[in-house]
Amino acid sequence: MFELNSVQKQKSTYKATQNACKLCSPLGASVAYKGFEGCVPLIHGSQGCATYIRRYLISHYKEPIDIASSNFTQDSTIFGGDENFKAAVLNIINSYKPQIVGIASTCLSETIGDDVNLFLHHFLEEYKDISTEFVIASTPSYQGSHIDGFHEAVSAVVKKFALSGPSQDHINLFTNFISTEDIRLIKEITADFGLDSILLPDYSESLDNPVWDTYHRIPEGGTSIANVERSGSAKASIEFGTILNQGNLTGRVKNKKLSRTGGKYLQNEMDVPSIEMPIPIGITQTDRFFETLKELSGNEIPEKYTKQRGRLIDSYVDAHKYTFGKRAVVYGEEDFVVAMAAFLDEIGIELALVASGGESGMLEEEVKKYCPENKDKVVVKEGFDFESIKEWSQENKPDILIGHSKGYYIARELGIPIIRVGFPVHDRIGGQRIKHLGYTGTQELFDKVVNALIEYKQTTSPVGYKYM
Amino acid sequence: MTQFLKERENQILTKGADSAEIACGKKSLAGSVSQRACVFCGSRVVLYPIADALHVIHGPVGCASYTWDIRGSLSSGPQLHRLSFTTDLKERDVVFGGEKKLYHSLIELIDKYQPKAAFVFSTCIIGVIGDDVEAVCRQVTREKGIDVIPVMSEGFNGTKKDGYKIANEALARLVGTNNDFKPAKYSINILGDFNLAGELWILAEYYKKLGVEIIACMTGDGRVDEIRRAHHASLNVVQCSGSIMHLAKDMKEKYKIPFMKVSYFGIEDMSEALYEVAKFFDDEEMMTKARELVTNEISKLLPALQPYRQKLEGKKAAIYVGGAFKAISLVKALRLLGMKTVVVGSQTGNAEDYKLLKELCDEGTIIVDDSNPNELSEFVKLTGANLFIGGVKERPIAHKLGLGFCDHNHERKEALAGYVGMMNFAKEVFASVTSPVWKFVREPQQFNMGAVPPDSSESQSS
C-alpha cells in the first residue's frame, strides 16, 4: 500500500526522465542478433515490445525487420510464459526456418521470474529432432540501456558457439553498434590488409538489403555459426569501445563488475588476446586501429589509406580556423560519444557538453583520456536526458549539436546546426549509410561539421557572401 | 493458402472462394510477428493528442522512448503531449517498488509544466510488482488540485483494442466535470479524429460553414477543459470507431447523447458525414448549406482528380491499416481513382467491419485480420498489387518488393481527410505508383542503361 508519510519523510532524489537519451535493452539485442546468419530475434514479453522496436528500427534502416514476440497474455504473466514461449518458437521455426532463434528477455519476463533456459530445455526434450540453434540474452529494460542489450546478445552468441582451438591467423572484430556503412568499411580495410576477419556481429547486409524480386523471410547476410565457432581460435580480438557493458548497470540491486563482452570471454576462456580501443573516429584513433592491423597482419598499411590519411590532414589544415574554439554538445551511446569527442578534440572544437543516457560510471574518465585538449574543461554527464541537455544548452549557448535525430528539437529551438550521426536517424534518409569510421568516415564527418559552421555564418551574415 | 501458419487460416479469406466468416478480435499468435502493438499502445495513441495534459509513463525506459513524439497529431496551442515523461524504473525500483518514484516524478513535472490534468500509464511490470498507482494518483490529485488519472494499460493485459477501452474510461472520468457551459444551438463532439496533419482543422471549417459548433474533439488538438464540457453537445460524431466507440456508448448511456458513425475520407463518405449531421439537426438551412458546400467542393475536385484517374485506372492496391473502418473508406476512395483493391486487412477490425468489407470488395479480394510480413508479402505477390497502403512497418515490405506506397498511419504529414485530403491522397498515390524508379526495381540485374524504352514502366506494370 502506498503510504504518504514514508514519502514525505524521505528527501527526494527521484527525478522523472524527460525525453530519454537511451532506449531499452531488447532493442540492442535485436540489432545484434540481426548480425548473425539465419537468425530471427524473439522478444520474450508482450507484443508491444517487439512491435515498437521493429517500428523504431525500421524508421532508421528503412528495411523490413522481422522480430517475433512470445506475446504474453494475462495468463502467461501469472502462470509463466512457458506455453507462449513454446508456441512462439514452433511458429517461428515453421514460418521462418531459421538457423538461430535469438531470444531476448524483457522487463516483464524477468520480473515474473521466467527461466528461459529451463523452458528451452523442456522444449528440446519434447522436440528432439529440431536442428535450430537457440541463444538467450538476459535483457530486462530496467538494467542498462539498449547498448547493454547489444553487447549482451553478442557475447551470448559467442559463448554459445565459439570453439577453443590452436591459434590461427584470422582475427575477431567486435565492432560495437556502428552503421551498416561503417561495417562495410571495416570489412574492406581488413581485407586490404589481407586479414581473414570475423565480424561480431555483421548486419551490414541483413539491415541494408538491395531491392528484392521475391520476399526474403530472413534477409541474407550476417556472420555464420561456422565463423562464430572459429572465433575461439582467432589470433586476437579487436573490440571497439572502452566502456562496452563493463560498467555499472545503474540501479542494480547488487553492483557486480562482470566481464560480459564477447572479447573478454574469448580472452579469459579461450586465450584469444583482446585488444580494446575506442571506435576509430578521428586520425588518432584510426591510426591506432591501422597500427594494430599492421601488427596483426604483418603487412604494411596500404597506400590507399596513407593517401586518405594525407588528404584528411590536408583538409584539417585548410579548415582549422572554422572549427577552432567552436563549442559543441555531443550526445548518444557512451562509447560512441567518446569516439566522437576524441575526433572533435583533435580539430580544435571545444567540447562544451558530452552527454549520454547510459550510466556506466566510466564515461567521464574515458572522455578525458581520449580528449587531451579538452580534458580540463569538458563537462561530462551520464544518465542525462534530452530535457537536461536542452536546459544546459539554453544556458551555455553551444554553437553546434552532434548526435542523432532526437536532439533536433533542441537545435531548432536554439537556432544552431545539428550534425546527424549514430542511431537513430529518423528524420533523414540514409541514416544507415552514414560513414563515421576510418579516415574516409572522419573525412565525411569533418566536411559536414565544417560546412555546417560555415553555412550558419553565411546565413546569419547580414551581407551574404559567395567566397569562404 | 497452406504456406501460412495453420492457426491463422480462419483469419484470412478470399471473397468468392471462402464462404466462412473471418475470425477476428483474437489475441495475436505467439511467434507470428504480428503488426499489432499492445494494450499500452492502444491507450497511449488515444490519449496522446491531448496537448495540455501531462502524459507520464510509469515503467522502465523503453515504452516512453518508443512513443516520444511519434504521431502527426498537431496542436494549435500547447505542445506538452510531444514530450516523453517516464519514471525510468531501474532494477532497484522493481524490487522495492516504484510508487515513491512515481509520486516525486509527478510532483516535479506538475510543478514544472503546470498541466491541466495528468495521465499515468502503467506498463507491463507495474501490474506485476503491484504498485498502487491509483493511490499515488489520488494523493497527487489532492495535493496539486488537478486530475491525475491512472491508465492501467499493462501491455500483456489483452490486445490494443483493450487499450482503447482503458483510455476511453480515462476520458470518461473527465467528461461531465464542467457544468458551467452554455452550448450553441447546434453542437457536436468529434470523436476518433486525432488531428493528424491538421485534419481536424479541415473538418472544423466544414462544420463551421454548416453552423455547427464543435465542443470537444476527442482527442485531436484536445484540451482537458473542452473534454470536461463535452457532455453538453447534442451529438457525438464518431470517426475511428474502433478506438472510441466505448466512450460514445458510455456518453449515450450517461448523458443521453446519441452518436453516429462517419468517415471523413473520400468524397462519398465525407459528404455523407455532412449530410447526416444536417439531417440529425433537422434544419433545412443547414441542409442547404451542406449541399452547397458539397456541390462546391466536388465541382472543383472531380475535374482535378481526372488526370490522376486516367493514369491510375486499373492499377491494383493492397491495404493494411490499424482500423477496419479506415480500410472501408480507402476501398471506396481507391475506386474513385479507378483503382481496384486486391488485398485488404486491419489490425483490429471487428466482425461487422469485415462483413462490410466483404460486401464492398470485388471477387477475389483477399481479406485478412491481424496479418504479418510473411503473409502480406505473399498476398501482394499473389495479386500483383501496384500500391500498398499502410504504416511504417508495412512501408519497407512494399518498397523492397517494388510497390508504390501511401502512408495512411499516425505518423503521416499529409492530411487525407475531407475534399482537400482526397486530392492529397490522389497526388500521393499518383506520385508513388507512376514514379520512374520502379523500372530499375523490376529488373534490378539488368545493366542495359538506355536500352529501356522510356514508357516501359507503364507497359510492365499494367
Image (cartoon, coloured by chain):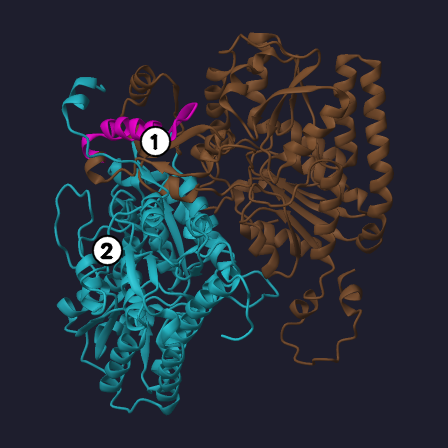
Q: Is residue B374 above or below residue B237?
A: below
Q: Residue at x 50, y 60 (%)?
A: A460
- Tell me the quadrant of the picture where the N terminus of chain A can be found: top left
Q: Position of residue A443 (x, y in %)?
A: 41, 76
Magenta segment, which residues? B94-122
Chain painted in cyan in the figure: A
Q: Nearer the viewer, residue B6 or B110?
A: B110
On the question of residue B412 being in view, the answer is yes
Q: Is residue B16 above or below residue B159?
A: below
Q: Position of residue A411 (x, y in %)?
A: 43, 52
Q: Amino acid at mark 2?
A: Val
Q: What's the mark number on residue A150?
A: none
Magenta stretch mostly in which secondary structure? helix
Number of callouts in the render?
2
- Rendering colour (chain B): brown
Q: What's the mark number on residue B112?
A: 1
Q: Residue at x 59, y 18 (%)?
A: B248
- The residue marked by circle 2 belongs to what chain? A
In this rendering, position of residue A404 left or right of residue A159 = right
Residue assigned mark 2: A379
- The residue marked by circle 1 belongs to what chain? B
* Secondary structure type for disc 1: helix
